[in-house]
Image (spheres, helix red, strand yellow):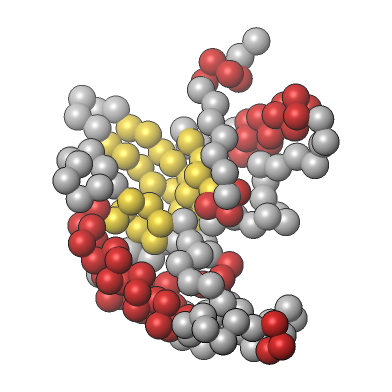
């Protein structure tokens, strides 16, 4: 990334692993005491990303980072401030401008496995693909949501369609 002139980074969240003690799923009995505190994890993230800080467009907050929001706001107040990069909140639109006047607008979000708009519960793979494609069409064609592509970090996988995939 550092040496590639065309490379950039858009952080999609979940830089730390952790839950606050007031989270409904927090249980001290099942906590791995060898896992560093979230603050220490954030310090490691800063060290890891520091060499490419000039390639970072923004960093979004993920659900694991959000657990700390009421206490210290790891992503916004530690990682982004230390790296001096923009905090993109939970989601953002970003406009890419290219030589020759071409522009692309991307929607970036951390998303959620329960609320994710591009998702299908169908056990049939072909139907799941069609459902996901319909969801993506709905996202990209929503009023006031004029964008060329959608990136979501919480999917933990990549789905890719070209414009020709949406025409019959």
Give the quadrant of the C terminus. top right
Q: Is residue 150 left or right of residue 5?
A: right
Instruction: Name the residue nearer the viewer: 104 or 32.
Output: 32
| 23 is higher (above) or lower (below) than 143 | below
| 31 is higher (above) or lower (below) than 151 | below
Q: Residue at x 20, y 25 (%)?
A: 100
Q: Residue at x 70, y 29 (%)?
A: 129
| 134 is higher (above) or lower (below) than 118 | above
Query: Can residue 75 be seen in this snapshot?
Result: yes
Query: Can residue 142 be seen in this snapshot?
Result: no
Q: Residue at x 82, y 36 (%)?
A: 122
Q: Would you identify the image quadrant in which residue 33 lies?
A: bottom right
Q: Is residue 100 left or right of residue 96?
A: left
Q: List x then y, in percent, for residue 71.
A: 52, 88
| 70 is higher (above) or lower (below) than 76 | below
Q: List x then y, in percent, for residue 24.
A: 74, 81
* Total numbered labels: 0
Most distant residue in the top direction: 168
Q: List x then y, in percent, for residue 64.
A: 56, 70
Most distant residue in the front direction: 34
Q: Is residue 56 left or right of residue 166?
A: left
Q: List x then y, in percent, for residue 7.
A: 26, 43
């Amino acid at each position: 990334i550092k040496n590639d002139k065309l490379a950039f980074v858009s952080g999609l969240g979940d830089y730390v692993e952790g839950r606050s003690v007031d989270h409904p799923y927090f249980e001290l009995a099942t906590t791995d005491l060898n896992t560093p505190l979230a603050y220490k994890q954030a310090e490691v993230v800063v060290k890891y990303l520091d060499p490419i800080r000039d390639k970072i467009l923004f960093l979004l907050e993920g659900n694991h980072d959000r657990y700390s929001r009421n206490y210290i706001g790891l992503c916004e107040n530690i990682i982004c401030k230390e790296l001096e990069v923009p905090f993109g909140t939970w989601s953002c639109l970003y406009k890419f401008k290219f030589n020759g006047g071409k522009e692309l607008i991307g929607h970036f979000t951390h998303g959620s496995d329960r609320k994710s708009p591009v998702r299908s519960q169908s056990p049939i793979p072909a139907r799941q693909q069609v459902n996901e494609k319909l969801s993506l069409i709905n996202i990209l064609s929503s009023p006031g949501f004029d964008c060329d592509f959608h990136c979501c970090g919480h999917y933990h996988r990549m789905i890719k369609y070209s414009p020709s995939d949406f025409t019959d």
